[in-house]
Amino acid sequence: MTRERRREFLDALGALNRMTLDAFQDPETAARIDQFDMAFRMQAAVPELADLSTEPAHTFDRYGPESRKPGSYAANCILARRLIERGVRFVQLYHRGWDQHSNCPAGLKTQCYDTDQPSAALVHDLKERGLLDDTLVVWGGEFGRTVYSQGRLTADDYGRDHHPRCFTMWMAGAGVNAGTVHGETDDYSYNIVRDPVHIHDLNATTLHLLGVDHTRLTYRFAGRDYRLTDVHGNVVKALLS
């Protein structure tokens, strides 16, 4: 369907929906009209946004050899920067396959090859363009991995199990105290021994960096006053610049 044909279709649909809105004055109908129109504007912007042919060669050199492959993590990092340049307020990148219960040496090497250079390039790119001052970058997963082996241990093959006791996130950009290392584990990387950051604390800190007070919005449910971080969480001030 051409862009012009899609626009005609949505205009006709909008006219029908406005007849219903005039008859019943339902705000959900008005919201639906706006949603269709916003979706069209987003779709219309995609071809230009996703066209990386306009990017100079040094951009691909910076993001690494995989950045020329559509759908790769490196290419998506370039798209993330282009989205942020155009005012998109939230961008989420995924990179799957970190579940190394076996063959950890080879698997982890592959994962880091995919992500290390383009992730660093994205931060540098945002900084050079003056976008990092008001863009928060959060990088991490949902848990860590055991420091000890899972399964058979050989010289070149072993695995690691899920480990929720302690794991690492890194943050960069708006309001983050750059170069700060916060928290410490024991010598075996098994338990936290200093400055723990609970997931509720991480969420509270992230919201604070986005300009949201996580304690402001509360609602009572089942006898408890819930907020954006459940009923827990404190801003970790040591992470703030």
Image (cartoon, helix red, strand yellow):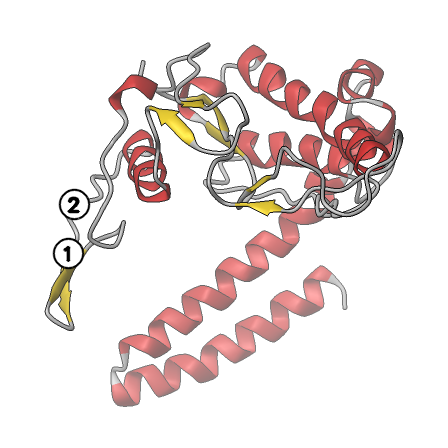
User: Relative to 13, does residue 170 appear above or below in the rendering?
Assistant: above
Is 204 above or below relative to 97?
above
Q: Residue at x 33, y 77 (%)?
A: 28
Counting the numbered discs, the total is: 2
Identify the residue shown where x is 75% and y is 28%.
112
Name the spot of residue 202 as percent of width and height, x first: 36, 36
Looking at the picture, tell me which residue is in the foreground, 41 or 162: 162
Would residue 236 appear left or right of 191 to someone viewing this image?
Answer: left
**Distance of label 1 from label 2 (alpha carbons):** 7 Å
User: Are the residues at dot 1 and dot 2 in contact (C-beta closer than 8 Å)?
Assistant: yes
Mark 1 — residue? Answer: 218
Bin the neighbour count of mark 1 within 10 Å (Cα to Cα): few under 14, some 14-19, many 20 and up: some
Describe the element under mark 2 as helix, strand or loop.
loop
Relative to 41, is 204 above or below? above
Disc 2 marks which residue?
Answer: 215
Q: Quadrant of residue 145?
A: top right
Quadrant location of the N terminus in the rendered image = bottom right
Crowd around label 2: few <14 · some 14–19 · many ≥20 (10 Å): some
The answer to which of 145 and 57 lies nearer the viewer is 145
